[in-house]
Image (cartoon, rainbow, N blue to C red):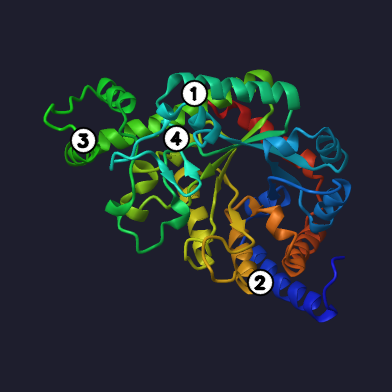
Amino acid sequence: MFKSSWKTGIDIICSLGFCVVLLLGCQTKEDKTHLQDRIIGVKIYDHQGELSPLFSQWKELGINTVFSSISMYSNHEFRTLAKKNNITTFIIIPIFFDPEALQENPNLYSITNQGKKAKDDWVTFVCPSREKFRKQKIESVRKLILDLDPDGLSIDFIRYFVFWEKVYPETNFDSIQNTCFDSVCLNSFQKKTKTTIPDSTTTPDEIADWIKSNHFTEWTQWKCELITSMIRDITQEARKLKPEIAINVHIVPWRQNDFNGAIKSVVGQDVSEIAKYVDYLSPMTYAHMVKREPSWVHSVVQDIYQQTESKIIPSIQVKEAYLGDTLFIEEFKESLTEALKPPSHGVIFWAWEMLEQYPQKKDVIQAISVISSSLYPQNARFAFYRNIHPLVNRQR
């Protein structure tokens, strides 16, 4: 047990136990079946030190699934320990966020409606229309599967450029940068939709305004199709090599009506279409980061589920980011409670590097694990494959 005061541990278990009882009381029989097999996951990008104690902590916390960076999963000991400890593994694969590719070839940059490179702080984006780049990414995914044989792929940055982490509730739609307005995208859009942009409209901002006024629906649909087709192609190639492999997609946490439907028109993620090709959708519901209440986490899960009826696994933050305000344990506990409400299929913690600094937040996670595991004991890996296998045939 992680060190904490006896009273703190009892308080956490009692308060979370009450929440779990409330959740169970309003669940249907189908909801309770899903609870048995839910994913309790953590993202990890780097780790300094021995790996064996790391897995021991995860087991003690009730974590049954790990979403790791490519570099972490490339470590043979990491993979061996994951199998030994019966922990399901996903490799996090960034797609259109590729700083190395952009450094090597700056012409790959996506271009905003202001005529600037798609770059904000650390976020830089490749234009999603580049066929050669898309094929290279798919080939790199194939190689990862052949070389490392993960249980699943967790596809990240499979979208258009936006620094959503700093888009707050009061943000006006017109202030959000839109992409991509480079010549490759514009030519592709015109060809696909049989649209002709007037010769008098030359600059990116003029073109963006013209499209918004005349062909915004077609533009939005075209963007979404470009993202969905990339997800489809990755999934199909992955399952040629490993039919039972699970696919998760990271989703920008915007509901369908937020910011005038920007989840489609800006981000290019149509969850109802994406869901046809993958097993899980994981909205990055970092409530504290984007100045939302913990209850917002559940509302995002509900919104996506209503559109897809898919398995939704919200990811929640464990430490403040981008803002100076502290993410206190009570707010974390509330976000976790909201994340686990039906129809959620579990929760993913972002990220272990931050979580390991906070013993009391670990106690919160462990308390829920103790309560739920006593109610629903389950072999994590068996449950994982039992539920994934029927989804292999969900592709068109």
Label 3: which secondary element: loop
Q: Which residue is mark 2?
A: 329
Q: Distance between the Cα atoms at labels 4 and 2?
A: 37 Å
Q: Secondary structure at mark 4?
A: helix
Looking at the rendered structure, the secondary structure element under dot 2 is: helix
Q: Residues within 10 Å of mark 1 (few under 14, many from 20)?
A: some
Question: Is residue 96 shown left or right of residue 216?
Answer: right
Q: Is residue 66 left or right of residue 395?
A: right
**What is the CA distance from the residue labelled 1 to the residue labelled 4?**
19 Å
Q: Quadrant of residue 13?
A: bottom right
Q: Which of the marked residues, 4 or 2, is nearer the chain's N terminus? A: 4
Is there CB contact under 8 Å for labels 1 and 4? no
The residue under label 1 is which amino acid type?
Arg
C-alpha distance separating marks 4 and 3? 32 Å
Reading the image, the residue beneath label 4 is 273
Residue at (32, 30) in percent of width and height: 182
Q: Nearer the viewer, mark 4 or mark 2?
A: 2
Q: Are marks 1 and 3 in contact (CB under 8 Å)?
A: no
For marks 1 and 2, give the one nearer the viewer: 1
- Provide the residue designation for mark 3: 203
Task: Work out whether 383 lies above or below 374.
Answer: above
The residue tagged 1 is: 134
Residue type, label 3: Thr
